[in-house]
Amino acid sequence: MKRNILIAVVTAAALVGGGTATALAVAGDDDDSTSVTRTDDDRDDRGEDRSDDRDGDDDDGAVLAAAPGGVTAAEAITAALEHTPGTAVSAELDDGSWEVDVLAEGDTWHTVRIAPDSGKVLGAQKDDEDDAAEVRAALKGASVTAEDAAKAAAAKGTVVSVDLDDDGGDKGWEAETRASGGDARDWNVDPKTASVTPDRDDD
């Protein structure tokens, strides 16, 4: 009975668009052969895919900036209010900086950008918003500020955003945290007691 045995492994190096290609020929009992070609580009793509899986969504770079030793959400709010006095309504890590929305006197809106590594004010701009009345109504009787809400939510993970929910009947603060593993969670912070509960809409 004739048997075909793998007698050679041929490796050829060829220049393919600046990378190398490796060809592997394998012979079986039925003389069929399988050829597999891998390029450096293929390996690079796989590496990029793994890197993307580790990175998660686009906010992770910003999340790292808020890790211990960086500027927390509460600290960013404090810095923003020192620059632009008023009522902080939201704070969010966005495009490499904290963006804090402040409702100032005269019902004018301002967005103050804070460096996540130093706490310095990077800039501020006046915004054209017309929902000041709704926001003030939502905050009526509230004793918990955005800064307080950020501090309370920090017990659940690294706070990457805090925002006033002024819609519907459940008015209060909403916060998003990231755990050390990168998992995101949404929380509700009571505007009177600062108690933190999981967001019912959080998947």
Image: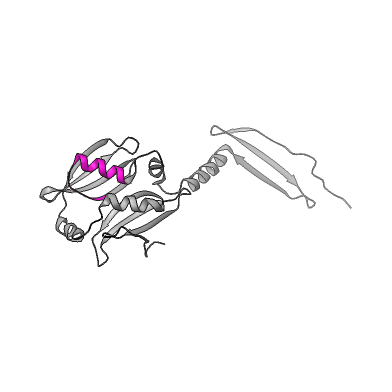
**Magenta residues, as a range?**
74-90
- Relative to 116, does residue 137 appear above or below in the rendering? below
Q: How many marks?
A: 0
- For the C terminus, the quadrant is bottom left
158 lies left or right of 141: right
Residue 194: image quadrant is: bottom left
Residue 84 located within the stretch drawn in magenta: yes
In percent of width and height, residue 191 lies at: 26, 59
The foreground one among 193 and 76 is 193
x 33%, y 50%: residue: 151
x 20%, y 39%: residue: 83
The foreground one among 152 and 58 is 152
Residue 99: image quadrant is: top left
Residue 87 located within the stretch drawn in magenta: yes
In percent of width and height, residue 157 lies at: 41, 51
x 34%, y 53%: residue: 152
x 57%, y 37%: residue: 40
179 lies left or right of 196: right
In percent of width and height, residue 97 lies at: 31, 40
- Relative to 167, does residue 116 appear above or below in the rendering? above
In percent of width and height, residue 103 lies at: 18, 49
